[in-house]
Image (tube, rainbow, N blue to C red):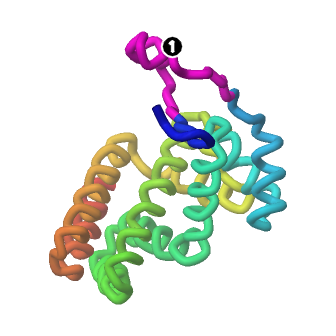
Amino acid sequence: EPPQGTYFFLVCHKPDKLLPTILSRCQIVRMQPDSPENISRALCEEEHADADRAMIAARISRSSYGTALKMLREEELADEYESSVKELLDAALEHNLGRLLAVAEALTSPGREKQRDFCIYAENYIRKIFMFANGVPQIAFATNDEYQALEKYASQIGKGFYRKALSSLDTAMSAIESNVNARLIFVDLCNRFYLYI
């Protein structure tokens, strides 16, 4: 038995799977998810988040404050990486290899952490385009500033692109974590976008 004043917290989403001997010694407290409005308000007050972005993150996160916070931090990546993703997509749509090579060269400059962040942001952006292309922009949870560009790309990109592009970005992230030469990673990525788009 634990000494007096000691508490153990067991977090479980399937209490019926616990052994009866353990369950009988537990005091069960059921935690219900908070509302998106409360999570959004907390993000605005505690993290000084933009109200529009906080509400989008709260809705996508399925009422998980931690997930919403993580998504907001990923949204902050937009300021740094949105122009690079657009440049990559525009160059691929033009089938301009010279411009694509310039994009690849620019992506090799930052360190590995920033290269990985770029790939994460690019995946999220491409998923948003996919939602627009399939006529469900409401579940893309895009900000008002993104709508025009997402609609443009959705009208220009073929349906076969998305799965291949996301797979290529996953491959690039694995290569980054394996310390593969960054120039090789991003030249390969840009070539694949050129072929797939």
Query: Where is 152 relative to 15, above or below?
Result: below
Quarter of the image where one finds residue 132: top right
- The quarter of the picture where the C terminus appears is bottom left
Q: Is residue 124 magenta?
A: no
Q: Which residue is mark 1?
A: 24
Quarter of the image where one finds residue 6: top right
Q: Secondary structure at mark 1?
A: loop
Residue in view at x 20 percent, y 67 percent? 175
Q: Which residues are the magenta region?
A: 10-31
Nearest the eye: 170 or 147: 170
Residue in view at x 41 percent, y 70 percent? 88
Q: Position of residue 60 (x, y in %)?
A: 63, 41
Our reading of the magenta stretch's main secondary structure is loop
Residue in view at x 30 percent, y 61 percent? 193
Query: Where is 68 relative to 90, above or below?
Result: above
Question: Mark 1, residues whose alpha carbon is within 10 Å: few (<14), some, or many (≥20)?
Answer: few
